């Protein structure tokens, strides 16, 4: 499966790119200024997937006004979300089948 090149959250649609070089201490980066995400190119599928979710958690928190995020907290949320998605694909399909009415009901 191809790596995703964009993501949507309630405030918009943003790019995901895969440069070969990012900070040597990081697998990914979220840029609050433009909403874009960079993920290190040569990661295993599982690490890449977890990193994408991690950076999207940063984006979601920032979009809701939570600007001071602790990496430890973001990582705990990420692990829980990834586990939930993997263990409950039927719930994800159920949510997706409802033509955005769930998202509209939250607004």
Image: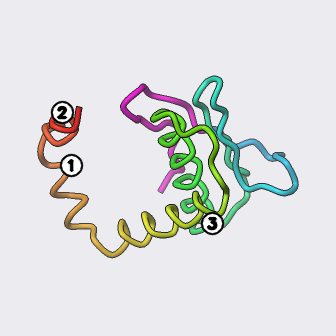
Q: Which quadrant would the C terminus be assigned to in this image?
A: top left
1 or 2: mark nearer the eye: 2
Give coordinates of residue 52: x percent, y percent: 56, 52
Is label 3 in contact with label 2 (beta carbons under 8 Å)?
no
Dot 2 falls on a residue whose secondary structure is helix
Give coordinates of residue 106: x percent, y percent: 21, 38
Vertical placement of residue 20 versus 49, above or below? above
Vertical placement of residue 79 versus 21, above or below? below
Give coordinates of residue 57: x percent, y percent: 51, 49
Left or right: 64 in relation to 43: left
To which quarter of the image does residue 11 belong?
Answer: top left
Cα–Cα gap, marks 1 and 2: 13 Å
Judge by depth and name the residue closer to the eye, 94 or 106: 106
Dot 1 falls on a residue whose secondary structure is helix
Residue picked out by circle 3: 47
Mark 3 / mark 2, whichever is N-terminal = 3
**Would you say residue 9 sits in the magenta stretch?**
yes
Cα–Cα gap, marks 1 and 3: 25 Å
Mark 2 closeness class: few <14, some 14–19, many ≥20 residues within 10 Å: few
Mark 1 closeness class: few <14, some 14–19, many ≥20 residues within 10 Å: few
Give coordinates of residue 26: x percent, y percent: 78, 55
Mark 3 closeness class: few <14, some 14–19, many ≥20 residues within 10 Å: few
- The magenta segment: 1-16
Left or right: 18 in relation to 4: right
Numbered label attached to residue 96? 1
**Would you say residue 15 sits in the magenta stretch?**
yes
């Amino acid at each position: 499966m191809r790596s995703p090149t964009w993501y949507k959250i309630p405030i918009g649609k943003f790019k995901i790119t895969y440069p070969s070089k990012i900070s040597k201490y990081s697998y990914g980066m979220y840029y609050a200024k433009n909403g874009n995400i960079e993920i290190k190119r040569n990661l295993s599928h599982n690490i890449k997937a977890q990193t994408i979710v991690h950076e999207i958690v940063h984006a979601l928190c920032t979009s809701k006004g939570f600007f001071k995020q602790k990496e430890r907290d973001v990582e705990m949320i990420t692990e829980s979300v990834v586990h939930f998605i993997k263990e409950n694909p039927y719930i994800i399909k159920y949510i997706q089948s409802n033509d955005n009415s769930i998202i509209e009901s939250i607004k």
